[in-house]
Image (cartoon, rainbow, N blue to C red):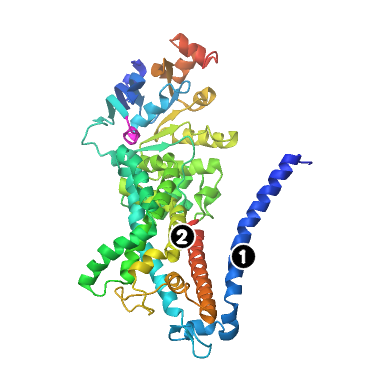
Amino acid sequence: MSIDRRESVHPIFQIENLSIAYRGVVALAPVSLNLRKNAVTALIGPSGCGKTSFLTALNRLTDMIPECRVSGRIRFDGSDLYDPITNVLDVRRRIGMIFQNPTVFPMSIQRNLELPLEEHGLKDRGEKQKRVQKALEDAALWEEVKDRLKENAQSLSGGQQQRLCVARSLILEPEVILMDEPCSALDPLSTRKIEELIHRLRGDYTVIVVTHNLAQARRVADDVAFFWMREQTGFLVEAGSREQLFAQPRHPETQSYVNGLEG
Amino acid sequence: MFPSKSDFLLRLTTCLLSWVSALILVLIVWFLFVESELVWREVGVLRFLTDDRWSPSGDFSSAQFGLFPMIVASLLLAVGSILLAAPIGVGAALFAAYYAPRGVRQIFPRIVELLGGIPSVVYGLWGLVVLVPLISAYHPPGTSLLAGIVVVAIMILPTVALLTLSTFQQLPTSLIHSAAALGIAPTGIVRSVILPASRSGIMTAVLLAVTRAVGETMAVLMVCGNVIQAPSSPFSPVRTLTANIALEMAYAMQSHRSALFATGLALMLVVTLLVLIAEQQRGKAGHV
């Protein structure tokens, strides 16, 4: 799938014939797609169409799923992501991920943020403190939690927990943030906060967000990729800019899906 | 609200059943008190701690009721065996949950359950025939606190390993995936995420194992030598509270019999003390 407009811009991910199978059953048929740097790309489509599988292949979290096989090639910032010499831990530091349900660690708010820093070798207390505050500010959470950093993170509301997860990713100063339906477990107000957050990340970070919610894709995305499925196998139908995909879809499946006729 | 008749019956039955289990505990303690009342009335509490020796027969003025060395032995045995069993059990559970190949993952809990099903007396036999001679070769007489600690540690290992394993299995996969997505190395995930998140479950496992260790009788009686003394080293023979009751109950009369029930009460106190300590630790675990 080639899209003229993005050929001109430096893509952060160049994906060629990426295919994913679980226990020998193909879940995602070969996908070729470029993702623009510092843009927000929404992956839309019905459940089971391989969006989440696609997303987890981008930070090699697929390595952790038993009997999951990834084939094809992904170039991340120019180098082969699945090359045996690629440092997975470093790649995952550069590519943060937010999950469908908030996954705060059962410890204090502060520990949640310091832990990834320490695991990546930062020991200096002053520096840690600075980065904790900066990450919380960037995730629009600082004002709400600055007086309760020692409290257990699980005492936060769902929306706050999700923003803490964003802060926990941002604290490692990543280049890319993957989001797997980040708002599907949240109320409308928290959803709005996350969407505002995505807007603020645009331009500084590459954001790739899986969503069921077409309205959300319309609100936050620069680019949209539309997945569909046929006989249990997901595949990419088309991708393009938000305006193009919603206003002038090239495929009839896309047209009926974005107009709410299917899926 | 007018609950239906069957709702009312169910509520009544479950309420009664919960009272029955609570009542059993009260009855046991009451029974121990009644049976040991003679010795409390004649001797008091203090002499159980201060008397030099344990020779509870005869009249009360000349008899000796020193339980202290046995309380120490029971505590050391329990603490020593859990210190040995906890790291092994948690380590085994970690391996079974996260590192072992699929086949081993499925077989491991079955094997450990089997280990837990071996009767106490068989462990005692093994200890007596294999372990005691080994220790004796290094430091006679062999029947010792150390032998008891090792045998009991093996006996409580299944409790620690299986309960810890089920704690690990209940952790949400997303927690581990999100740690991995932060680029945290596997050892870091175990140390900084899995273990802290499982702390309360591991404490429960340890608590159950400790109470089992304090209560263990037969195997301990077979390998510990049963000499009444506060141990000066791990190689000293010791007698635990449980062994004391089991050894002497058959022929005990009057004051002696009453003193053995007092031993039972002391045993309950030791267990309660350990449960309280563990509960307190678990309370702390909530706020890491």
Can you say whether B147 is above or below B119 in the image? Answer: below
What is the x, y in percent for residue B158?
38, 53
What is the x, y in percent for residue A62?
34, 32
Q: As drawn, which residue projects farthest toward the bottom?
A: B61
SS at mark 2? helix
Q: What stretch is highlighted in magenta?
A: A60-67
- Marks 2 and 1: which is nearer the front? 1
Would residue B193 be seen by someone viewing this image from the given angle?
no
Where on the picture, by quarter, is residue B218?
Answer: bottom left
The chain identifier of the residue carrying mark 2 reads B
Judge by depth and name the residue closer to the eye, A254 or B262: B262
Residue at 62 percent across and 64 percent down: it is B26
Q: Which mark is residue B207?
A: 2
Whether A63 is among the magenta residues is yes
Task: Identify the residue position indicated by label 1 in the image.
Answer: B27
Going from N to C along the chain, the mark reached first, 2 or 1, is 1
